[in-house]
Image (cartoon, grey):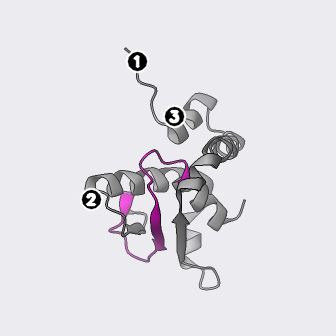
Protein backbone atom coordinates (compact mmCIF):
# COMPACT_ATOMS: atom_id res chain seq x y z
CA UNK A 1 0.00 0.00 0.00
CA UNK A 2 1.52 3.34 -0.98
CA UNK A 3 1.47 6.34 1.36
CA UNK A 4 -1.41 8.08 -0.40
CA UNK A 5 -3.58 4.94 -0.16
CA UNK A 6 -2.56 4.49 3.47
CA UNK A 7 -3.58 8.04 4.38
CA UNK A 8 -6.90 7.66 2.57
CA UNK A 9 -7.50 4.32 4.29
CA UNK A 10 -6.74 5.85 7.72
CA UNK A 11 -9.10 8.75 7.14
CA UNK A 12 -11.86 6.64 5.60
CA UNK A 13 -11.92 4.36 8.65
CA UNK A 14 -11.97 7.24 11.12
CA UNK A 15 -15.35 7.29 12.88
CA UNK A 16 -15.44 11.10 12.73
CA UNK A 17 -14.87 11.51 9.00
CA UNK A 18 -17.65 13.31 7.18
CA UNK A 19 -18.23 14.26 3.57
CA UNK A 20 -15.79 16.87 2.37
CA UNK A 21 -12.21 17.63 1.48
CA UNK A 22 -9.23 16.82 3.67
CA UNK A 23 -5.57 17.73 3.29
CA UNK A 24 -2.76 15.94 5.08
CA UNK A 25 0.51 17.87 5.13
CA UNK A 26 3.92 16.48 6.08
CA UNK A 27 5.82 19.50 7.31
CA UNK A 28 9.30 19.96 8.68
CA UNK A 29 7.74 21.40 11.81
CA UNK A 30 7.81 19.58 15.12
CA UNK A 31 4.66 21.35 16.29
CA UNK A 32 2.24 18.92 14.64
CA UNK A 33 0.38 16.07 16.29
CA UNK A 34 2.67 13.99 18.47
CA UNK A 35 5.50 16.27 17.31
CA UNK A 36 5.52 14.33 14.06
CA UNK A 37 4.95 17.29 11.78
CA UNK A 38 1.84 15.76 10.21
CA UNK A 39 -1.08 18.15 10.02
CA UNK A 40 -4.70 17.56 8.99
CA UNK A 41 -6.82 20.32 7.49
CA UNK A 42 -10.45 20.25 6.42
CA UNK A 43 -13.16 22.67 5.46
CA UNK A 44 -15.75 20.23 6.81
CA UNK A 45 -17.86 21.54 9.67
CA UNK A 46 -16.04 19.54 12.35
CA UNK A 47 -15.09 20.95 15.74
CA UNK A 48 -11.38 21.58 16.27
CA UNK A 49 -11.25 18.92 19.01
CA UNK A 50 -12.61 16.34 16.55
CA UNK A 51 -10.07 17.31 13.88
CA UNK A 52 -7.32 17.10 16.52
CA UNK A 53 -8.49 13.59 17.49
CA UNK A 54 -8.52 12.57 13.82
CA UNK A 55 -5.00 13.94 13.39
CA UNK A 56 -3.79 12.11 16.50
CA UNK A 57 -5.26 8.81 15.26
CA UNK A 58 -3.83 9.32 11.77
CA UNK A 59 -0.35 10.02 13.11
CA UNK A 60 -0.52 7.13 15.58
CA UNK A 61 -1.23 4.67 12.78
CA UNK A 62 1.20 6.22 10.31
CA UNK A 63 4.03 6.19 12.84
CA UNK A 64 3.60 2.43 13.19
CA UNK A 65 3.64 1.82 9.44
CA UNK A 66 5.84 4.53 7.89
CA UNK A 67 9.13 6.20 8.74
CA UNK A 68 7.74 9.74 8.98
CA UNK A 69 11.14 11.41 9.43
CA UNK A 70 12.35 9.78 6.23
CA UNK A 71 9.16 10.83 4.46
CA UNK A 72 9.51 14.47 5.52
CA UNK A 73 13.24 14.59 4.70
CA UNK A 74 12.84 13.22 1.20
CA UNK A 75 12.54 15.99 -1.35
CA UNK A 76 11.50 13.50 -4.01
CA UNK A 77 8.27 12.41 -2.33
CA UNK A 78 5.00 14.25 -1.98
CA UNK A 79 4.44 16.10 1.26
CA UNK A 80 0.77 16.93 0.85
CA UNK A 81 -2.17 14.68 0.13
CA UNK A 82 -5.70 15.70 -0.77
CA UNK A 83 -8.58 13.35 -0.07
CA UNK A 84 -12.25 13.89 -0.88
CA UNK A 85 -14.97 11.83 0.76
CA UNK A 86 -18.55 11.45 -0.34
CA UNK A 87 -21.42 9.60 1.27
CA UNK A 88 -20.70 6.58 -0.96
CA UNK A 89 -17.18 6.24 0.48
CA UNK A 90 -18.60 4.93 3.74
CA UNK A 91 -19.49 1.69 1.93
CA UNK A 92 -15.83 0.61 1.82
CA UNK A 93 -15.05 1.19 5.51
CA UNK A 94 -14.97 -2.47 6.54
CA UNK A 95 -12.68 -3.45 3.67
CA UNK A 96 -10.35 -0.53 4.41
CA UNK A 97 -10.32 -1.35 8.12
CA UNK A 98 -9.36 -4.95 7.36
CA UNK A 99 -6.46 -3.79 5.14
CA UNK A 100 -5.25 -1.39 7.82
CA UNK A 101 -5.46 -3.96 10.63
CA UNK A 102 -3.62 -6.48 8.44
CA UNK A 103 -0.83 -3.98 7.73
CA UNK A 104 -0.47 -3.26 11.46
CA UNK A 105 -0.36 -6.97 12.32
CA UNK A 106 2.34 -7.50 9.67
CA UNK A 107 4.41 -4.88 11.51
CA UNK A 108 4.14 -6.93 14.70
CA UNK A 109 1.26 -5.06 16.35
CA UNK A 110 -0.92 -7.37 18.45
CA UNK A 111 -4.29 -8.10 16.79
CA UNK A 112 -6.24 -6.58 19.72
CA UNK A 113 -4.23 -3.35 19.57
CA UNK A 114 -4.48 -3.18 15.78
CA UNK A 115 -8.25 -3.51 16.05
CA UNK A 116 -8.43 -0.82 18.74
CA UNK A 117 -6.28 1.58 16.70
CA UNK A 118 -8.41 1.12 13.61
CA UNK A 119 -11.89 0.58 15.02
CA UNK A 120 -11.61 2.43 18.32
CA UNK A 121 -12.30 1.05 21.76
CA UNK A 122 -15.25 -1.23 22.19
CA UNK A 123 -17.70 0.32 24.61
CA UNK A 124 -18.58 -2.02 27.41
CA UNK A 125 -21.70 -1.77 29.54
At a point 67% along the width and 40% down the height, the residue shown is 98
Q: Quadrant of residue 29?
A: bottom left
Question: How many other residues sit within 10 Å of disc 3, few (<14), some (14-19) or many (≥20)?
Answer: few
At a point 46% along the width and 59% down the height, the residue shown is 19
In this view, the residue in front, 90 or 69, is 90
At a point 68% along the width and 44% down the height, the residue shown is 95
Does the stretch in magenta take in 31?
yes
Question: How many other residues sit within 10 Å of disc 1, few (<14), some (14-19) or many (≥20)?
Answer: few
Q: Which residue is mark 3?
A: 116
| Residue 72 image label | none
Q: Are marks 3 and 1 in contact (CB under 8 Å)?
A: no
Task: Label 2, secondary structure: give it.
Answer: helix
Q: Is residue 57 above or below residue 81?
A: above
Is residue 63 visible to the viewer in this orientation of the structure? no
Q: Which residue is mark 2?
A: 48
In this view, the residue in front, 7 or 72, is 7
- In the displayed orientation, state which residue is furthest to the bottom: 75
Task: Label 3, secondary structure: give it.
Answer: helix
Name the N-terminal-most of marks 3 and 1: 3
In this view, the residue in front, 46 or 25, is 46
Does the stretch in magenta take in 125?
no
**Residue 50 in the figure: left or right of residue 118:** left
Is residue 28 visible to the viewer in this orientation of the structure? yes
Q: Which residue is mark 1?
A: 124
Quadrant the N terminus occupies:
bottom right
Amino acid sequence: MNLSDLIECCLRTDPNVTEGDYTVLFSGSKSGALNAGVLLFTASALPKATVDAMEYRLVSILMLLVNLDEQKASTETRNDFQVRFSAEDHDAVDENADHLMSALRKRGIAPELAKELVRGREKSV
